[in-house]
């Protein structure tokens, strides 16, 4: 899926990171660019994708580690990045129905934080997914979620 004049997402090869695609919103006033910053995505096999963010000081909690809310935002965005990248779905109009998260470790500054999401099953209306958040070989969280695909345009 390449960026075009009607897309909210900029999803195209990243010239600074071979093998990766940008996963950014065109409107820089929205949550993702304002809070999360620039992100990258790449497919990993037929049914998985990896979404990468770059933690900065404003992503940390009082302990100096990546805030759990930032980690959850990353994995929620990873669902849609995977939906668009692997299934070529309409990520702009899909919605999260449910998500379960288990925190296992804490993300650190200075190293990319990755959410690797796998599509378990796809039906006509739903996509069931699971994944892991990892950083430099350390497991940070696991998650499972269901997203609802957009309805056909009327």
Image: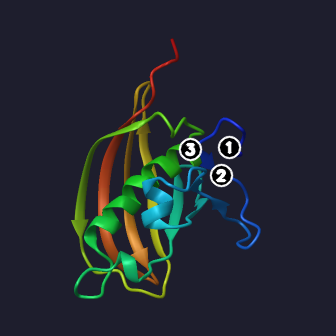
Residue drawn 26% across and 80% down? 61
Q: Could you tell me if the residues under marks 3 and 2 are in contact, i.e. CB atoms within 8 Å?
A: yes
* 44 to the left or right of 70: right
Between the residue at mark 1 and the residue at mark 2, the CA separation in whole angstroms equals 7 Å
Q: Could you tell me if the residues under marks 1 and 2 are in contact, i.e. CB atoms within 8 Å?
A: yes
Q: Position of residue 6 (x, y in %)?
A: 66, 35
Q: Residues within 10 Å of mark 2 (few under 14, many from 20)?
A: many
Q: Position of residue 69 (x, y in %)?
A: 28, 65
Residue to which mark 3 is pinned: 84
Please tell me in which quadrant of the rendered image residue 107 appears: bottom left
Can you see residue 131?
no
* 76 to the left or right of 105: right
Residue drawn 30% across and 69% down? 141
Which element is circle 2 on?
A: loop
Residue drawn 50% across and 55% down? 29
Between the residue at mark 1 and the residue at mark 3, the CA separation in whole angstroms equals 7 Å
Which residue sits furthest right? 15
Can you see residue 29?
yes
Q: Could you tell me if the residues under marks 1 and 3 are in contact, i.e. CB atoms within 8 Å?
A: yes
Which element is circle 3 on?
A: helix
Which residue sits furthest front? 29
Residue 85: mark in rendering: none
Q: Position of residue 128 (x, y in %)?
A: 37, 42
Residue to which mark 2 is pinned: 11
Residue to which mark 1 is pinned: 1
Between the residue at mark 3 and the residue at mark 2, the CA separation in whole angstroms equals 9 Å
Q: Position of residue 60 (x, y in %)?
A: 32, 80
């Amino acid at each position: 899926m390449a960026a075009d004049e009607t897309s909210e997402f900029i999803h195209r090869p990243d010239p600074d990171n071979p093998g990766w695609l940008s996963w950014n919103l065109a409107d820089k006033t929205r949550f993702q660019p304002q809070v999360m910053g620039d992100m990258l995505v790449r497919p990993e096999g037929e049914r998985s994708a990896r979404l990468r963010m770059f933690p900065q000081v404003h992503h940390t909690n009082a302990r100096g580690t990546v805030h759990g809310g930032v980690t959850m935002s990353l994995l929620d965005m990873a669902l849609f990045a995977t939906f668009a990248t692997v299934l070529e779905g309409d990520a702009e109009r899909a919605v999260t129905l449910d998500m379960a998260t288990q925190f296992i470790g804490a993300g650190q500054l200075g190293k990319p934080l990755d959410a690797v999401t796998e599509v378990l099953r796809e039906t006509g209306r739903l996509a069931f997914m699971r994944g892991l958040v990892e950083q430099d070989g350390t497991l940070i969280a696991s998650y499972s979620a269901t997203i609802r695909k957009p309805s056909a345009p009327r």
